[in-house]
Structures are given as structure tokens and as C-alpha cells.
Image: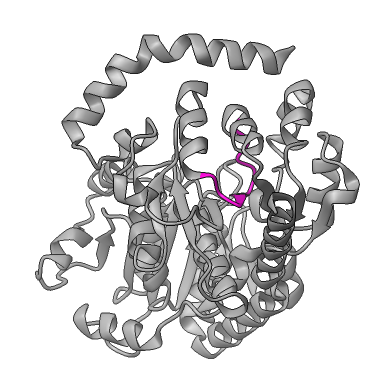
Amino acid sequence: MILGCYKLIAGVCYPIFKPAFLIKAKLEGPDSLWAGRLGVLPEAIYEGPPPDLWLQAVSVGEVNVAEALVKALDRIAPGFKIFVSSSTPAGFARAQSLLGDRCVVIPFPLDFPQVVRRLAKQLRPRVYASLETELWPNLLHAIKAKGSRMVLLNGRISQRSFPLYKRVKSLTAPVLSCFSKFCAISDIHAQRLEELGAPRDRILITGNAKFEGLLDRPSFKKAEYLKNKLDIKRDVPVWVAGSIRGGEEPLVVKAYSKIRMKHPELVVFLVPRHLEGVERIEAALKNAGFPYQLWSEIEMGKPRRCHIVLVDVIGPLFDLYGLATVAFVGGSLVPKGGQNIMEPAAWGCPVIYGPHTENFDDARVSLDKAEGGIAVVDEEGLVKNLDLLFKNMSLAKEIGKRARKALEEIAQGAASKQAEVILEQFRKSKTIED
């Protein structure tokens, strides 16, 4: 009933909103994100055989996982024809940067039946794979109707969204039935998928491919280049506060105001999770009277002149973790579910995080167990532990080594396992079609 209403409403709404979408697409140009979201792609994309795999990665974090999966597929099945789609401007740009030379990168279509039926008919992928829990009913049914096999990769249902999904199980269950296989990141997520209607015999627990993809990402050569470019001396402590979410800005700035009294030479990089957070951090810094410099100025060739650098562009965060003596990962001092606390761990950097890490509970358990992470509840705890690690660099390095070890243990070839699942479904799709 709910699914039928969703399809009906989406079909009725499309002609109403289409003129506005077309204007946006026209303003952006023929190869724009909005044109692609309406299913209008360059003709060259349809040349040759259909893709072996259409991989959907909603935004930047999922695109990083897609990179790990593509690398795993290239190891075991070179030559696989892969399309990668993304829903957000940042994700689309990231996909073009990371995977544009290897894959065809396209915008993810809006879930109107008129759009997705046409696109499914044109692309006809052998396998459609969605990263994490991207459940768009019209698209999934349109692709399945063309005979594609479907896989949910890196399957996870957050603690916060699970009750909501349960309330609309009459919608989620028929959508989940479209998938031939589910690759859950852990037991708890497998259980949640099953409770929402995923058939138990189709669920595998493969681990989190997001973590395997981190293992080979650090470039210590690039980190050294950045240190020289930013004129950061070898013994100067560096604090990277990454993925700062709304409500954390004043807490982080207060922490800096206290820790700088003990470590006046400290260099800090403040990185909001979303670009709209730049203004909030700027306001907090101005209220506190702290001078700062924008990262975009440094990218344009200006030398670093302030102890505080505010990152106002998408992309540098992971490499900046390579400069850090200590990292704080945001979205965790406020109830936002946390961000990827394993990114600093990939560099062997000690990680500090708040109590709200529900979206990365498996990572937190691993870091806590290995004593590679430090949990705090407020800015006072943040200041206390920053001070401890800045005063004892050997302890910071030891905790960083434990963090890296925790990452290596939790990765466990998850991307490779999920790539094998994709290949299994690809072979079945050939058998069916033949």
C-alpha cells in the first residue's frame, strides 16, 4: 500500500517539478549534474556493451568505499566495465577525481518513474550495487525489471534510523526483496536488515569495506610535502579537528583557547563536515578573537601565517590527518552519530572522539579494545587529553600505532569479499541471460 502510494505520488509529481528541473539543468549546461539527475547523459556513454556493474555511492564517504571496491575488482577481474554514480555535488566531484580515469562517472537519477525507467532501459547493467542503505524503490524496480542482479554492499542500518525504517516496513520489505545479496558490515546490521524484511539466506557478513580502502591511502611523501609547504617544524604539535558538525564549533574553539595557553606553538586545522559549517566556525573564531587563515588562500600560493587554518574546501581532510600529532573526529561531541574515526588511524595517528559514535560503532569497539582511541565527553576532556599527548609525544606515537593495528584487524579484506559477491552475481546474470 505505502509502496504503491510512493510510486503514484512520484509519478504525479514529476511533470509538476520537471520545468524547474529543466531550467536548473539548462543553466548548468548539457553535461551538468542536474541534467544527469534527470537521466540525460552524453550519447558517448551508451556506446559499446552495457556496464558489467553500476555502483551507486551517494556522497564523498561512499565514493571512497567505491574506490576500494574498484581496486579489489581490478585485482580479481581486470577489465570489468564499471559505472559509478553519486547523488551529491561533492560526491560527484570526488568520484570524477578518484575514479574518472577508470570508470564512467554519472549523476545518480532522481527517483521519478519516468526518469529511472528510461535510464534503466538505456544502461542495462549486469549488476547494480548500492553502497550502504540506498533504497530508491522506483529505480530498484526499474533495474530489476531489465534482468539486472542487485547487491547491497557495506550494508548498515544506523541505530538512529532503524526505528524509522521499522515503522515503514511495508515499504522497506518489498524494496529489500529486490536484492539478490546483502553484504552486512556486522552481526548487528545483518540482524537489523533481516528485521526490516531482507531474506536471511541472502545476507552475508563481510565487514566494512570503508576500512579496507583506508589501508593504502596514506601517502607519507605527500604528508612531508605538506609539512614543508605549511612551514611546520618537526617538533611543533599539530591538532587536526576533522568533520566538525553543527554545535561543535564553540566547543572546539573553547578547547583551542585553553590548550594554546599550554602549547602556544600549536598549529590547528579546523575542518567542517560540510562547507556551510565554515561560516559557523568563522563566527566562533571571531567571537573568541582568534586570527585564522583560510585553506583556499594557501592553495592559491599564500604562505601559512596563522596558527589556525580553517579548511573551506572539500578534500584535504584525509591528507591533513597525516600531519597531525593528535586528531579529533567530530560529529561525536553532539548527537550526530560520528564520522569515520578510522581515517586518522590509517596514518597511525591517535584519535579522540566524543560519546556519539553510533554510525561507527564497530570502529569504536576496535579502537577501544586496542587502546588506539580516546573517548571524551566534553571540551574539558578534549583539552586534558590533547595536553597529555602533546607533552608526551612517545605516548602519542604508541597510541597511534595501536590505532593503525586496530584498523588492520577490522579491515579483514572486506572490499575483496564484497568484490567476490559482485562477481558471483555477475556470473549468475550471464547464465540467466544466456
Q: Residue at x 82, y 40 (%)?
A: 198
In depth, the one of 147 and 293 nearer the eye is: 147
Question: What x and y, as percent, mark residue 349?
Answer: 52, 78
Hey, which residue is sitting farthest front in the picture?
Answer: 434
Q: Is residue 68 left or right of residue 187?
A: left
The part of the image, by quadrant, that contains residue 406 is bottom right
Q: Can the viewer see residue 399?
A: yes
Majority secondary structure of magenta residues: loop
Q: Where is residue 286 in the image (x, y as percent from the top left)?
A: 22, 46
Magenta region includes residue 163: no
Q: Which part of the image, by quadrant, shows the N terminus?
A: top right
Q: Which residue is drawn at 43% across and 15% down?
A: 14
Identify whether 59 is placed above or below 26.
below
Which quadrant holds the C terminus?
A: bottom right
Q: Is residue 254 left or right of residue 395?
A: left
| 169 over 122 or under it: above or below | above
Q: Residue at x 37, y 30 (%)?
A: 38
Residue 284 falls left or right of residue 395: left
User: Residue 240: which quarter of the image?
Assistant: bottom left
Q: In this view, does 55 lie above or below 107?
A: below
Magenta residue span: 124-136
x, y (%) of residue 155?
Answer: 70, 50
Q: Can residue 294 be seen in this view?
A: no
Q: Give the x, y percent position of residue 306.
A: 19, 67
In this view, the residue in front, 378 or 191, is 191
Q: In this view, does 93 lie above or below 321?
A: above
